[in-house]
Image: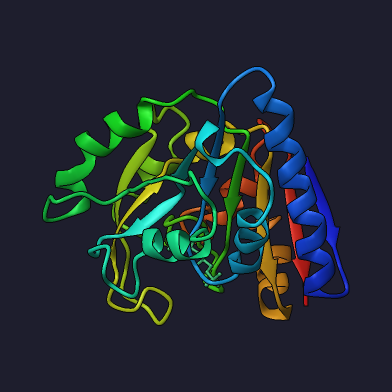
């Protein structure tokens, strides 16, 4: 089921979304470590900064990534570096990376999978973004590896993707990403989008017939987990 949380301003959106996240994390932490999956991209920056300045017990939370571009940590396109920068004021925050020293995501996959299997199975929060091409996480339209990452019976948490080069991917076509099954295994699955262009892509994806062309449709149309869609202009 889709829950649409639409706001008139980004300030309202990030206020509501940060409260949603803090509640979800805190509830669970009474009995267990929390597990949070974070996306890169630029849209979630204000959310991460609010969370970073909240009184969370950061070291009692497993922070993992939704997806990564296969670039070194120092690279400006590194999602890990972007997220670490957003959380720089959060003492005890430690993000588990999704890139290793192997030459490409396929070669690095075994190590990544072991690392991502080492935390509990169901996430408390998974924050997704979306691109104007209908990608989410690093599930890019027509990408090599996409079919497997979207397969109902995919048991991997992490998958290797080689996207088709486009204006959206830039030169970063080698990616590691959560599989659809790892994404939807979540107590709070959030799709965070802003702007009219992404709203139109989202509205079309709700009934898109082919998730190989519009991967976010696989998230929106599955019946396993509710999806909370946060949007503002
Ligand atoms: O590595 C990435 O590119 C992402 O994690 C990706 O899935 C992102 O969430 C969308 O591309 C939206 O990105 P923007 O927020 O920058 O529009």
Residue reaching furthest to the right: 8
Q: Is 178 on the left-hand or right-hand side of 10?
A: left
- The residue that appears at 26% across and 51% down in the rendered structure is 99
Q: Is 143 on the left-hand or right-hand side of 84?
A: left
Numbered label tally: 0
Q: Is residue 143 above or below residue 183?
A: below
- The picture places residue 106, in percent across and down from the top left corner, at 19, 47
- The picture places residue 211, in percent across and down from the top left corner, at 52, 53
Q: Quadrant of residue 224?
A: top right
Q: Is 98 on the left-hand or right-hand side of 66?
A: left
Q: Quadrant of the N terminus?
A: top right
- The picture places residue 67, in percent across and down from the top left corner, at 41, 53
Whether residue 61 can be seen here: no
- The residue that appears at 32% across and 64% down in the rendered structure is 163
Q: Is 27 on the left-hand or right-hand side of 118?
A: right
- The residue that appears at 77% across and 73% down in the rendered structure is 10
- The picture places residue 206, in percent across and down from the top left corner, at 70, 55
Q: Is residue 53 above or below residue 108?
A: below
Q: Nearer the viewer, residue 30 or 187?
A: 30
């Amino acid at each position: 089921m889709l829950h649409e949380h639409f706001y008139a301003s980004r300030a309202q959106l990030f206020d509501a979304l940060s409260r949603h996240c803090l509640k979800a994390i805190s509830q669970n932490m009474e009995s267990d470590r929390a597990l949070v999956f974070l996306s890169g991209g630029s849209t979630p920056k204000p959310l991460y900064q609010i969370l970073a300045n909240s009184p969370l017990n950061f070291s009692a939370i497993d922070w993992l990534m939704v997806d990564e571009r296969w670039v070194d940590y120092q690279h400006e396109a590194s999602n890990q570096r972007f997220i670490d920068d957003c959380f720089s004021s959060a003492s005890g925050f430690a993000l588990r990376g999704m890139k290793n020293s192997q030459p490409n995501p396929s070669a690095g996959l075994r190590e990544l999978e072991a690392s991502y299997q080492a935390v509990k199975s169901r996430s408390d929060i998974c924050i997704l973004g979306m691109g104007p091409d209908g990608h989410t996480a690093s599930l890019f339209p027509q990408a090599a590896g996409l079919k497997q990452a979207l397969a109902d019976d995919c048991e991997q948490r992490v998958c290797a993707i080689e996207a088709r080069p486009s204006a959206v991917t830039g030169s970063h076509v080698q990616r590691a990403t959560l599989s659809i099954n790892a994404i939807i295994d979540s107590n709070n699955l959030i799709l965070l989008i802003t702007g009219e262009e992404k709203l139109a892509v989202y509205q079309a994806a709700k009934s898109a017939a082919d998730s190989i062309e519009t991967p976010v449709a696989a998230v929106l149309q599955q019946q396993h987990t509710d999806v909370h869609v946060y949007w503002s202009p």
